[in-house]
């Protein structure tokens, strides 16, 4: 489990085809030092398995499904990616619950400086499957970053971005039209399922309860 608080921005230095999968090599100053082979790491919001770890780099294999259904479809050597290690059991919970399981891909509409401000507006087009879980002042993960919705107009989501977030993530490297990884708030999905009132698969009858001594 992750929290959407980015720890470091890495750089994709190599992409190679290995059978049906692609292997990426990511360079980073500090994150690799805390990894072990087989450990999980969120790369721009996608939970991947760390392999071939070195002091300043690690690799990860991407299945065709991961490549096609995430923002990795725009990935190239030199691309910047957001990195986050899993939350420790005794850690402080920042951000919100992020699983690293991308629900869909949005599109960057605009990343603009707010007039007479040091902050920015991030405008994202989001698919309807995710829009239903997105609410004003609610949480959403974009490229693995825990962000708060400032405005929601149908399939257009607007978020206020402070300078620190620009400095500590890959947002500044993205261009209009770029795909971005989106993960909806997990709690919203559980609430939806509970509100549907789906019955248990094999509900017990009164007769069965009596037979079992209740």
Image: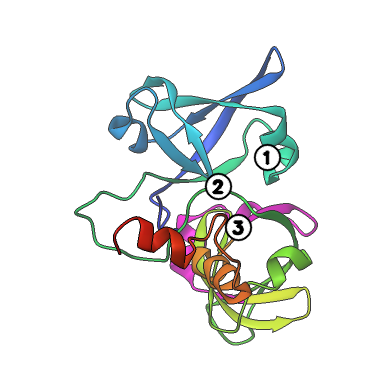
Marks 3 and 2 sit apart, C-alpha to C-alpha, by 14 Å
Q: Which mark is residue 44?
A: 2
Q: Residue at x 34, y 65 (%)?
A: 94
Mark toward the start of the polypeptide (2 vs 1): 2
Secondary structure under the numbered disc 2 in the rendered image? loop
Residue at mark 1: 72
Question: In this orientation, which residue lies closer to the viewer: 128 or 107?
Answer: 128
Residue 72 position within the rendered picture, expressed as x and y whole percent measured from the top left: 68, 40
Q: Which residues are magenta?
A: 159-183
In this picture, residue 88 sits left or right of residue 83: left
Is residue 109 at all visible to an observer of this figure?
no
Q: Which mark is residue 160?
A: none
The crowding category of the residue bearing disc 2, from other C-alpha atoms within 10 Å (few below 14, some 14 to 19, many at least 20), is: many
Q: Which mark is residue 172?
A: 3
User: Height in image: 79 above or below 61?
Assistant: below
User: Height in image: 188 above or below 203?
Assistant: below
Marks 1 and 3 sit apart, C-alpha to C-alpha, by 17 Å
Magenta run includes residue 170: yes
Cβ–Cβ below 8 Å for labels 2 and 1?
yes
The crowding category of the residue bearing disc 1, from other C-alpha atoms within 10 Å (few below 14, some 14 to 19, many at least 20), is: some
Q: Residue at x 74, y 64 (%)?
A: 129
Q: Residue at x 70, y 54 (%)?
A: 104
Question: In this orientation, which residue lies closer to the viewer: 64 or 201?
Answer: 201
């Amino acid at each position: 489990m992750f929290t959407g608080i980015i720890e470091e921005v890495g750089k994709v230095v190599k992409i190679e085809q290995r059978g049906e999968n692609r292997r990426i090599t990511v360079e980073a100053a500090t994150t690799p030092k805390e990894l072990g082979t087989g450990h999980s790491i969120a790369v721009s919001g996608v939970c991947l398995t760390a392999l071939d770890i070195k002091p300043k780099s690690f690799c990860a294999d991407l299945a065709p499904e991961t490549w096609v259904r995430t923002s990795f479809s725009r990935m190239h050597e030199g691309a910047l990616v957001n990195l986050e290690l899993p939350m420790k059991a005794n850690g402080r919970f920042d951000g919100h619950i992020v699983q690293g399981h991308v629900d869909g891909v949005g599109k960057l509409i605009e990343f603009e400086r707010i007039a007479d401000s040091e902050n920015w507006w991030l405008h994202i087009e989001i698919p309807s499957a995710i829009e239903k879980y997105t609410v004003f002042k609610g949480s959403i993960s974009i490229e693995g970053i825990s962000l708060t919705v400032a405005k929601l107009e149908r399939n257009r989501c607007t978020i206020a971005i402070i300078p620190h977030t620009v400095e500590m993530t890959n947002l500044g490297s993205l261009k209009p039209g770029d795909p971005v990884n989106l993960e909806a708030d997990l709690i919203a999905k559980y609430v939806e399922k509970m509100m549907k009132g789906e019955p248990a698969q094999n509900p017990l009858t009164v007769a069965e309860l009596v037979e079992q001594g209740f």
